[in-house]
């Protein structure tokens, strides 16, 4: 059933610009039409390079590695909530790591920048690159969502989530 649905929607997907494809399969998240330039004044230059040119911050550079409060990690560009603090764990990699995202809020694609393929993931709403997902995470899901800290903002549970922007 699922397979049939997927195949049926393929012709439509191939007509969409790359940035919009991921959101087509995400539940309830409306993709924004903006080009990367739209976000240039709304995030720091370093964050922009990560979000819209798929740069990677140096390991151990993010203050979010040591963020252990309860709260929500939102996309640094459009503020869509991407991870809950309950999914954060210490992976020892030097990047903020999570066992699972907020369902439907991230899209994925294969990335061949290294010799072996990796799975890239990005915000389903603005398309901003967040990180890569690997299959060496802790049980039960076994997933390691390895995120650039600069692509996220942490909102403690005691504060209201910011309104989505864009
Ligand atoms: Zn976003």
Image: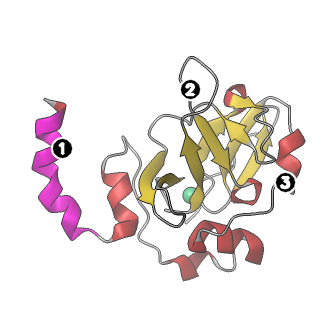
Mark 1 lies on residue: 6
Mark 3 lies on residue: 62
- The location of residue 87, given as percent across then percent down, is 67, 28
Q: Secondary structure at mark 3?
A: loop
Q: Is residue 5 above or below residue 21?
A: above
Task: Specify few, some or many for label 2: CA neighbours under 10 Å numbering under 14, 14-19, or 20 or more.
Answer: few
For the record, the magenta segment spans 3-16
Distance of mark 2 from mark 1, alpha carbons?
A: 25 Å
Distance of mark 3 from mark 1, alpha carbons?
A: 38 Å
Q: Quadrant of ligand 1?
A: bottom right
Residue 58 is covered by the magenta coloring = no
Q: Is residue 51 above or below residue 59?
A: below
Q: Is residue 113 left or right of residue 55?
A: left
Q: Are marks 3 and 1 in contact (CB under 8 Å)?
A: no
Question: Does label 2 or label 1 sit earlier along the sequence?
Answer: 1
At 63% from the left edge and 63% from the top edge, which residue is drawn? 77
> Nearer the observer, disc 3 or disc 2?
2
Q: How many marks?
A: 3
> Nearer the observer, disc 2 or disc 1?
2
- The location of residue 57, given as percent across then percent down, is 76, 63
Mark 2 lies on residue: 142
At 13% from the left edge and 47% from the top edge, which residue is drawn? 7
- Quadrant hosting residue 66: top right
Looking at the rendered image, the quarter that the C terminus falls into is bottom right
* Extreme residue toward the bottom, this view: 37
């Amino acid at each position: 059933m699922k397979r049939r649905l997927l195949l049926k929607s393929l012709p439509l997907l191939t007509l969409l610009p790359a940035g919009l494809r991921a959101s087509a399969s995400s539940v309830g998240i409306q993709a924004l039409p903006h080009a990367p330039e739209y976000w240039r004044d709304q995030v720091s230059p370093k964050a922009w390079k990560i979000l819209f040119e798929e740069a990677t911050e140096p390991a151990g550079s993010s203050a979010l590695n040591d963020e252990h409060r309860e709260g929500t990690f939102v996309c640094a560009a459009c503020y869509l909530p991407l991870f809950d603090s309950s999914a954060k764990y210490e992976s020892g990699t030097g990047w903020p790591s999570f066992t699972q995202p907020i369902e439907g809020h991230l899209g994925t694609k294969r990335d061949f920048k290294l010799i072996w393929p990796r799975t890239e993931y990005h915000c389903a709403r603005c398309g901003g690159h967040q990180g890569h997902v690997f299959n060496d995470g802790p049980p039960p899901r076994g997933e390691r969502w390895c995120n650039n800290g600069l692509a996220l903002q942490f909102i403690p549970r005691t504060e209201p989530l910011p309104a989505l922007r864009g």
